Amino acid sequence: MEVVITDDINFLPCPLVITDEVGIVLQVNRAFTDEFGDCAINTNISEIFPKASQIFLQTHVWPLLHRQGSVKEIYLKVRARTEPQLPVLLNCSRGEFRQQQCYRWVIFPARERSRFERELIKTQNDTMIYAQRLQKANARLQAVLNSATELVIMVLSPDGTVRFNNSSAETLLRYKAGSLAGQNIMTLFGQTDTASDALHRLRAMFTAKGRAGFGKAETLQLDTSMTDKDGNNVEVAVSISPVCRKNTTNIDELLLVATDRRQRKQLQCN
């Protein structure tokens, strides 16, 4: 039997199929035939779906329709004129057609959504690969920095907060692994004259807005003492230099390198 199309549903800009309560096609609109081709009256609507979507239709969509009378935004594939499996979003609700109970199936082609989802999945996969590579690179860098057992290395935010440190910093200052991060460098200097001078010079460089007062090529070097976890003073030689963005004068981080002056004195005595 040929498709029957009436004018009262042809004004709709989206494909529409009207079926009886078991899925037999009663009517379609022009937008449907333009997108999906002919759908013969008295055939089952399941015939427009590929096999996988037919199974989902029977196991999920029909039970929902019988239970609640409608479904919204069901993602399926439909056979179209130019595509064997066109992604679509399906809305369906119970109603009445020519004095009999029916279901109205509104089908929205989702080509762009499908393309966007593929791109999103690819981006997520690429991001995961990049994150794994970055994690490996960070692990290698951490291993290299930890091998520098005679150097205390810290990366500071412009306001002096410790963002990163190697294991030698924790060993020298008797902190547990990972517990130095988040400390402010100001709290790690001892109560000595040289430490007070260091604090004074550091405070002059760190503003209340969290921006460093360093020039791009400026490095602060001083002999002072730092306080370990138990409150003991540790004599150190400290060098703090800015880390700037490429081709700019914006200071993103500060690099602190310190050495234990006690070891240097012992070597000089020997």
Image (tube, rainbow, N blue to C red):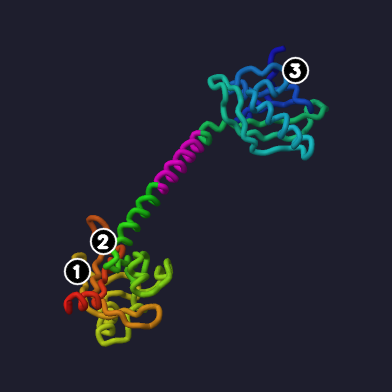
The answer to which quarter of the image holds residue 33 is top right
Q: Nearer the viewer, residue 144 or 62?
A: 144
Q: Residues within 10 Å of mark 1 (few under 14, many from 20)?
A: few
Q: Main secondary structure of the magenta part?
A: helix
Coordinates of residue 88 in the picture (x, y in percent): 59, 31
Coordinates of residue 78 in the picture (x, y in percent): 61, 25
Q: Which residues are magenta?
A: 115-132
**Marks 2 and 1, how far apart at CA:** 11 Å
| Number of numbered tags placed on the structure image | 3
Q: Amino acid at mark 2?
A: Cys
Name the side, left or right, on which 3 lies relative to 84. right
In the rendered structure, which disc, 2 or 3, sits on the residue that comes first in sequence?
A: 3
Q: Amino acid at mark 1?
A: Glu
In the rendered structure, which disc, 1 or 3, sits on the residue that comes first in sequence?
A: 3
In the rendered structure, which disc, 2 or 1, sits on the residue that comes first in sequence?
A: 1
Describe the element under mark 2 as helix, strand or loop: strand
Name the side, left or right, on which 110 lies relative to 157. right
Q: Amino acid at mark 3?
A: Asn
Coordinates of residue 142 in the picture (x, y in percent): 35, 58
Q: Residues at badges 2 and 3 in contact (C-beta under 8 Å)?
A: no
Image disc number at residue 244: 2
Say if the magenta span includes residue 117: yes
Q: Residues within 10 Å of mark 2 (few under 14, many from 20)?
A: some
x 64%, y 17%: residue: 38
The answer to which quarter of the image holds residue 247 is bottom left
Q: Nearer the viewer, residue 94 or 129?
A: 129
**Marks 2 and 3, how far apart at CA:** 73 Å
Task: Look at the image and tell me in which quarter the C terminus lies.
Answer: bottom left
Q: Is 164 located above or below residue 79 in the figure?
A: below
| Residue at image mark 3 | 42
Coordinates of residue 232 in the picture (x, y in percent): 35, 83
